[in-house]
Image (spheres, helix red, strand yellow):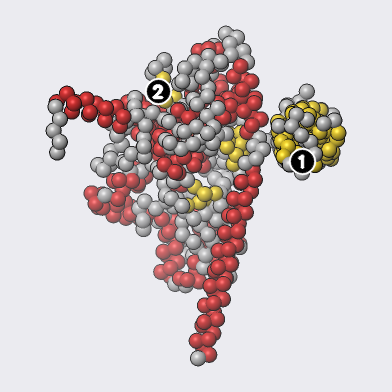
Amino acid sequence: MRSQHIKASLLAVATVLTVSAQAQQDSTTAGIEAYREALQDGNPADLYVDSGAEIWKKKAGPKEASLEKCDLGLGAGKVKGAYAQLPRYFKDTNKVQDLESRLLTCMEKLQGVDTAPIIKAGFNSPQKADLVALSAYVSSESKGMKVKVSMAHPKERQMYDLGRRLFYYEAGPYDFACATCHGQDGKRIRLQDLPYIPSAEGAAKGWTTWPAYRVSSGQMWSMQWRINDCFRQQRFPEPIYASDVTVAISSFMAGNSNGSVMQTPGIKR
Amino acid sequence: MANPMKIRAASKDGVTEIKILMNHEMETGQRKDSSGALIPAWYINEVKVELAGKTVLTAEWGPSVSKNPYMAFKVKGGKAGDKVVCSWTDNKGEKRTDEAAVS
Amino acid sequence: MMTFKKKTTVALSLIAAMTAGTVFAAPPALPKDGSWGPGAGDANFDAMMQSGFQNKGIATTDRLKQDPTQKLCSNPVLAESPKTAALREKLQAENEASIKYPSDGKWMGDWKNGEKIAQSGRGLTWTDKAGEANGGNCYNCHQISKQELSYGTIGPSLYNYGKLRGNSEEIMKYTWGKIYNAKATNVCSLMPRAGSMGIMTEAQIRDLMALLLDPESPVNK
């Protein structure tokens, strides 16, 4: 009788300990959620949106021209809603391009800028700063609009399929693929929840919230920057800025996100 | 002048809520660059906010305030159309003043 | 089945074809035969990978070359197919053959060091320097001690690992094997092959073993 009583007490204690450990864990993640919600108001990304809007209008390059005639897919100079439909096929370059790739095209064609050094430069460099600010600006002009990424052109579908194959591609000393972290539902790395990117909801979690301001580093990150750092953590070599590798993985995420609402620019921990 | 700040203000039921997002590095002076040298301290140390010509907030800040500081506060009074003026000074003596109308 | 005049049938299929590929209503399923879609065959994919990456720091493009285990596990359809069952067995055996057990027969080191290794996520990225000790990255995916609340859930909880299993020689060997090369027992495991890939040294693995199996380790309290 006495041993049963002890066993029952031990079980009760064990349950309480497990429950309080769980409660502690839940209160940790709940606390972080509350912090993330509080961050939404007063997003420093807005400062980059303003700066990007100015860069869009500023005359630059050997041709002394602004980017105001840049065609982001909806016609020359039309910025509103353009980000929600990227990546897409462009007739003039005969390829599928994401925002940053297309901005480079416009800088070359409209402004006569040599983009090779910009492509080579690190994300923290002044050369990349304009592109980051422009990303914040252009993405903000699609805030509240539905993702509508076309797969009608064969090259668009091809880019999606290449991106999907890349998503599952394991390589490097860790055998990591994008799928290692983002290929199952309901997981997290440390305390960071990981969206399940092959699904519509998971892809949308990522695709509709970058570019974003990262509070922990005080930096504004474009989507190319976010992709670059993912490959770094995968222990891969570095993806070339605006290469097909980067456009493909964006096409995969964007294609899966169709119908979801753009919330860019976002704010992250 | 230094980088512009974003000011939003709205009045409701006799209370005006003012939200200000400032553009500043707010360097603590404790960080080191890649060569190991200390990055000099550079932060806003004085803030003043006026509503309809009257000072409603003054603040003395230090290096513990984070980069791109965001401040939101409520003031009794104020109405749509009133002018909100925010000025800051930093430890290097740089200044910035911006204004917006209460909506 | 309703029959239509030929013109109507053609018109209807055209409309279906036009609207079908325009925008995805939901993500399309992977082809059941393990292929990737018409434009994403080996030639196009390899060309994209070749032109899309560059060396940076210690992270060089030769890392993109896959070994047979990576190649199989990169295809979620083929990795689970009955067609590759024999290949999975073969690769597990190859991974197992690469496991080097401790040269001096000593299974465990210092759990205090093991905790430091488990906490560190450093190593092998292009911002890391050659010759520096790598971290184990363990807390990124696993719960380990009770005190550390910042843990991931990609892998199972390792809390009370030793307490639940004991310290038998069999458990020692199994645990060492898991850390050294988790793909020996589960070929498409998400866990990096710490020993076989040279991520952890023998001494570091001993310290991780102690973290999991030493009765004095906080993991087992």
Say what secondary structure mark 2 lies in. Answer: strand
Residue receiving disc 1: B14
Q: CA distance from mark 1 to mark 2?
A: 53 Å
Residue C105 image label:
none
Mark 2 falls within which chain? Answer: A
Number of marks present in the image shown = 2
Residue A163: name its quadrant: top left
Residue B53 in picture, x, y percent from top left = 85, 30
Mark 1 falls within which chain? Answer: B
Kind of residue at disc 1? Gly
Kind of residue at disc 2? Tyr
- Mark 1 touching mark 2, by CB under 8 A? no
Residue occupying image coordinates x 86% and y 33%: B54
Between C9 and C21, the one lying in front of the other is: C9
Question: Left or right of C79: which side holds A29?
Answer: right
Q: In front of the other: label 1 or label 2?
A: 1
Residue occupying image coordinates x 33% and y 39%: C28
Q: Residue furthest bottom?
A: A1
Q: Residue furthest right?
A: B54
Residue receiving disc 2: A89
Question: Left or right of B75: which side holds A176?
Answer: left
On screen, residue A154 above or below A38? above
Between A105 and C27, the one lying in front of the other is: C27
Q: Residues within 10 Å of mark 1 (few under 14, many from 20)?
A: few
Q: Residue furthest front?
A: B13
